[in-house]
Image: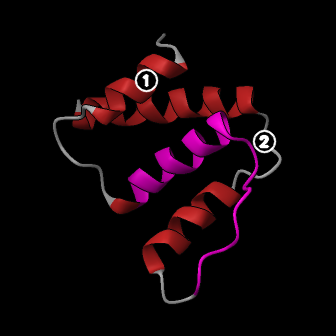
Amino acid sequence: MVSFEEAAELAKNFSKKPTDSEFLEFYGLFKQSTVGDVNIDKPGILDLKKKAMYEAWNAHKGLSKEAAKEAYIKVYEKYAPKYA
């Protein structure tokens, strides 16, 4: 099993780009793993990309950093065969 740090590095180097929804899975868990609960203001309604990223992160509110790291590794393992 890979560590969180290894999974994060390997995911950055996927040979193909994940879909937007797959990217948001990674993003939300990565931010929760490294920062914790959302600590920024919600973006404006017209900034769709930043709003989606905010919502992906906020979806994991209350999840511990350790649990988020474990979930990130599972998401990596789920998509690695498709994109690695």
User: Residue at left 68%, top 40%?
Assistant: 35
Q: Is residue 30 magenta?
A: yes
Which picture quadrant has residue 51? bottom right
- In the rendering, at what x and y percent does residue 74 appear? 52, 29
User: For the residues marked 1 and 2, what is the alpha-carbon distance in whole angstroms?
Assistant: 19 Å
Nearest the viewer among 24 and 77 is 24
Which quarter of the rendered picture does the C terminus lie within?
Answer: top left
Which amino acid is tagged 2?
Leu
Could you tell me which residue is drawn at 37 percent across and 25 percent down?
9
Label 2 environment density (alpha carbons within 10 Å; few <14, some 14–19, many ≥20): some
The structure residue drawn at horizontal position 74% and vertical position 56%, both measured from the top left corner, is: 39
Label 1: how many residues lie within 10 Å, few (<14), some (14-19) or many (20+)? many
State the image coordinates of residue 62 (x, y, percent, origin top left): 83, 47
Q: Secondary structure at mark 2?
A: loop
Eyeballing the image, is 83 above or below 51?
Answer: above
Is 20 displayed left or right of 75 in the figure?
A: left
Whether pointer 1 and pointer 2 mark residues with C-beta atoms closer than 8 Å, the reply is no
Tell me the SS state at disc 1.
helix
10 horizontally vs 32: left or right: left
Q: Reading the chain from its start, which is encountered first: label 1 or label 2?
A: 1
The image shows residue 72, relative to residue 57, as above or below, that is: above
Quarter occupied by residue 45: bottom right
Q: For the view shown, which residue lies furthest in the bottom direction? A: 46
Query: What residue appears at the point 73 percent right and 42 percent down from the top-left corner?
Result: 36
Name the residue at the top extreme: 1
Instruction: List the residue tagged with mark 2.
Output: 63
Q: Residue furthest front?
A: 40
Residue under numbered circle 1: 7
Type of amino acid under label 1? Ala
Across and down, in percent, residue 20 comes to: 36, 61
Range covered by the magenta-colored residues: 21-44
